[in-house]
Image (cartoon, coloured by chain):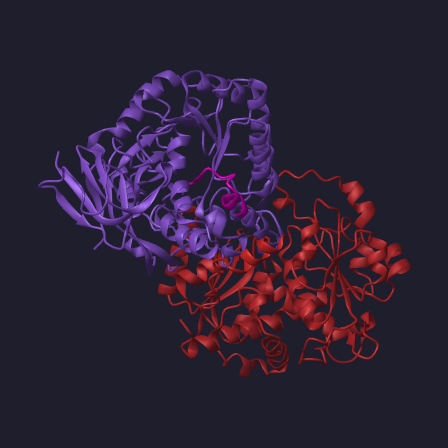
Chain colours: A red, B purple
Amino acid sequence: MTPTAARRTLHSPPVPASPFPFHPGSLLSVDHLTLADVSQILARATELEIEDPVARALILAKRRVALLFYESSTRTRTSFELAAKSLGVDTTLVSSLSSSIEKGESLKDTGLTLRALGAEAIILRHPNSGSAWLLEESTRLPVLNAGDGMHQHPTQALLDLRTILAHFDPLTKLCHPERAERVEGPAFPAPAIEQVDEHTLAGVTVTIVGDILHSRVARSNMLLLPRLGARVLLCGPPALLPETAAQAGPGIEIERNFDAALQQSTAVMMLRIQAERLAGLALDLEQYMAAYQLTGQRLAAHAPRALVMHPGPIIRGLEVTAGVADGPQSAILEQVHHGVAIRMAVVERALAASENGGRA
Amino acid sequence: MTALTIRGGKLVDPAAGIDALKDILLRDGRVAEIAAPGKLKSANGAESLDATGLVVSPGLIDIHVHLREPGQAYKETIATGTAAAAAGGFTAVAAMPNTVPVNDSPEVTRWMQAPERGASIRVFPIAAATRGSKGEMLNDYAALKSAGAVAVTDDGHPILKDNIMRETLAAAARVGLSVIQHAEDTRMTQGASMNLGPVSFRMGLRGMAPEAESSLVERDIRLLAELRDARAHLHVAHTSTAAAIAAVRQARRNGLRVTCEVTPHHFLLTDEHVAGYRTNAKMNPPLRAASDRDAMIEALLDGVVDAIATDHAPHATHEKEVEFERAPNGITGLETALGLSLRWLHREWKMPLGRVLSLLSAQPAALLGLKGRGTLTVGSYADVVVFDPKAEWIYRAVDTKSKSRNTPFDGFAMQGKVRWTISEGRIAYTSE
């Protein structure tokens, strides 16, 4: 850039300040969370997890939350629903396949209808990136983004963080997968670390492997974990991992050689190839598996101590072998488990903020 | 028809090389006399406008607008679109053919110009290059031209087939019409809704590569060069990438008749303005990276760009209040072009006032061969804008004269406020 051009960039119309989130209880993107927010959510997740179930069910008794799902989901939907119900919340599920959405009702009108029915917060999953922004702007209700297109899935990043912290030894800067094998106490213990800062994960390398381009889980993690000091390595073929991904934020690097990436990994997140979003992209699966499938042999050779993660759904035999998915380094089911605690905390945060009137 | 004088203003007519205090007499829709202040000879009894402290210049000409009529009157009509144009200081607009039905016939071309449409200013239809803008069969350009069409284009449906584009350039050259191309290789932009780059990756939106624009510009220039017909004229619509500008610059050095326009949003905003999934920052071509935006500014300053055009593209509120990827492309622009150009091109980036006005009047008129417009020499059409060049104000979308409010410039600071817009001798707009 020439000096004059650089000067012009400085003297051009500024980007208007984003009004989002309109509501302090909303969780649209990990970008909107301060590290203090993250610490508070982690701490509250553990408190709610160990709370007596009967007492817990009184915390938000008879409050109303709508789950609005435009895409299929097993984990996220059930997890949010169980989380909300365990706090005493009345939930209702609206899915695109059994509602007026099929008749052409817009997202705005659907949201306004749910609000008129008494919903105090909406949990949204939607195939279009940014749809949670539209819903929040339309309803001014707290909106919890449960996955918007290829963009964000913030509660997944938080539960992944909780999973990593549960295995993390701040002295050795390693994750110890074997902790999940404890005989006594809960099968999936809560992390000892709840207060996080910009150095908490210094020295940690988290590798995300596979279909990065179409993954909201990858985007959420790559934008959250480096803020705690972690280095994020992205690994995948150019068709699924464009070079621009490294510019998404600080602390993100690309390593296309899977074995080299594994050798540096404290934790490795495997991703599913999102066939529904490939949009005509032809992919040689055999070639892909040869280069990027996580096999027992590969894991033993290059990352025998790394924590193996996967947001699900897993396609066994494609991105991971069954042996790795069920193996001792796998934290896949533990991630699912941590989702409930995290979602209890964010549902409570959403409704607590609306009780105080919010900013709306 | 009555006469009208404009007294005490500073006449800035770049095509005539005038930048001085002048009184001006308009009669029968034409400029009748220009004289030093107080020296008009034949103004007896004419109504007079006091332009003291104001700039008097040729009415602005926008060669790229979508007026939505026929067929989409809920977005805009020719009456409302031209009212917005007049409020923005425009006295002529060239209307794109992507109406319903597509303007690919002399009938629609004439219908758009009929007095019943209620236009406040002159409307010049641009006809479709091919039947239904499907890129297959050429229209009858001679018939379209005699019906009033000033150029041909398939605007939002760029002509991709080499042979069709070659024939279009050749056939248009034979009747003396310009070919306008919306340069986008749509095979490269399927499902994309913003500029391709780090911002689109971060936002989880599929992006349009800058190469989708520049590769088609390069292809069109190659076809034009092969044609070897000096009459052939290619005009590149809403240029948005450094690479496309570079291709136009090179073609001109090679002596080819290639022109281009740039919109205010492409010389002001970047893809960062899409943040928050603002559908009013969604258009095609999309807002680009800062380096491309800076290239537009450089190109305006160094003279490669021939015109500022708005690509005024109204859409109803309910059409824009949807998921970003499902929202239609386009923003309004007629009321903000002058205020933004003066605020940024003139004040911030020091382009002389005469050059800004030339890009908004004389040059676009010359580009489309609009005779007697874009200048105020005696005998020209009495198309005039009178504005206060110093006035600073804030644009409010709710105050628009357009039927639609889809602008990214709501709340933006403007410089230069239109006092009167005069179209062929009639006052088309007066500020309150």
Vertical relation: A77 (above or below) B194: below
Left or right: residue A122 versus residue B4 is right
Which residue is found at the position 28% from the left and 55% from the top? B399
Left or right: residue A114 versus residue B386 is right
Q: Residue furthest right?
A: A301
Vertical relation: A225 (above or below) B146: below
The question of residue B299 being in magenta is answered with yes
Looking at the image, how many numbered discs can be counted on the residues? 0
Q: Is residue A337 visible?
A: no
Q: Position of residue B19 (x, y in %)?
A: 34, 45
Is A51 in front, or is B73? Answer: B73
Q: Is residue A224 visible?
A: yes
Q: Quadrant of residue B186?
A: top right
Is A155 in front, or is A171? Answer: A171
In which quadrant will I find the C terminus of chain B? bottom left
Q: Position of residue A55 (x, y in %)?
A: 54, 84
Q: Position of residue B25 (x, y in %)?
A: 19, 39
Which residue is found at the position 44% from the left and 47% from the top? B264
In which quadrant will I find the N terminus of chain B? top left
- Residue range highlighted in magenta: B298-309
Q: Position of residue A281 (x, y in %)?
A: 66, 39
Q: Quadrant of residue A62?
A: bottom left
Vertical relation: A195 (above or below) B64: below
The question of residue A354 being in magenta is answered with no
